[in-house]
Image: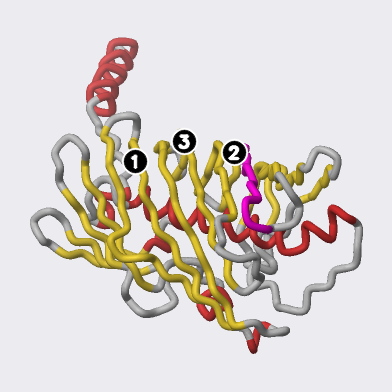
Amino acid sequence: MQAKSTVKFIIVSILVFGCSKVNPIPTVEEQFDIPEGVKEPLAFEFMIHDVEGIVFNLLHSLHERDKRVVSTHEDYNVFAGRGECANQQLDTDLNILLLNYGNGCTDDSQKIRRGQIELNYSDPDDKIGNVVTVVLRNYHLNGLGLHGQIRIENISQTNSTDAKRYSLSFSNLELTINSESSIFTGNREVNYAKNNGSQFETTELDYFASNNYRFEISGQKAFNLSTPSTLLNIFNCWLNETYFPKSGAFSIQEVAQKETTSIDFGSGACDYSLLITDIDNNQKSFDLSAIL
């Protein structure tokens, strides 16, 4: 009798617990009520700007390091401190600088970085025509990652430390947001102009960027992105450890359905907030810091 009761209890338990549902973890889109294809280019903007800052920081002193001469720079390096918790290995014969963050290190802004960034440069002097190929090997910043290559060419009009212009190109560059993967192919142009100062208190800088690329999310939907209004970063925001456009706009078009979503960065504040307008002209505020 006891055996039958035990069997009956097991059967009832299987029926009850076997039918119970596990609530799935909501996606970022569901959690913040934002359209598909929005968080990826925003995270990409944050990450590629981070990589640019690291590269430009290194280029500021690469000529002196490569030639083993004393630095003669009198101007303040506006990119100082970017990603500087890595072990560095410089090969002046092969023109390669390797940044190794290993399994994780904490930078000055308390962000965790891991993976590797390799710079292959045509000339240690950052002059017109210089090309740097950036190889990202599972590079991560907190929960975001970039893997692949970026080609950066100096296309400035004149060789100046006060004004620089660069062309960036990339193909099949992989962005990861936690476990989600998306692929980016296209180009980007950045330029900056600064009023030189020997200290950060006397330095001012405007940093402009425009994008034209295609990206695919989860190997399914494809989107085209353009920059109808140039993105603007300012040095004062960087001093507050905010590395995101202060103004500018994205236009994101889903390739198959031709549906367009607009992103307006023009909050005017040093933060990660922006305004999303979907195809039905519905507007939604979103703060990217929620996923950084």
How crowded pointer 1 is (Cα within 10 Å; few <14, some 14-19, many 20+) is rated as many
CB atoms at circles 3 and 2 under 8 Å apart?
no
Q: Earlier in the sequence, mark 2 or mark 1?
A: 2
State the image coordinates of residue 129 (x, y, percent, origin top left). Answer: 62, 51
- Asked if 161 appears above or below 22 in the picture, the reply is below
Which residue position holds label 1? 214
- The residue that appears at 26% across and 34% down in the rendered structure is 221
**Cα distance, mark 3 to mark 2?**
16 Å
Q: Earlier in the sequence, mark 3 or mark 2?
A: 2
- The one nearer the camera, 17 or 43, is 43
In the shown orientation, is residue 16 left or right of residue 173? Answer: left
Q: What amino acid is labelled 3 in the image?
A: Ser
Q: Is residue 188 visible?
A: yes
- The residue that appears at 64% across and 60% down in the rendered structure is 56
Which residue position holds label 3? 171
CB atoms at circles 2 and 1 under 8 Å apart?
no
Task: Point out the stretch of residues depicted in magenta.
Answer: 127-137
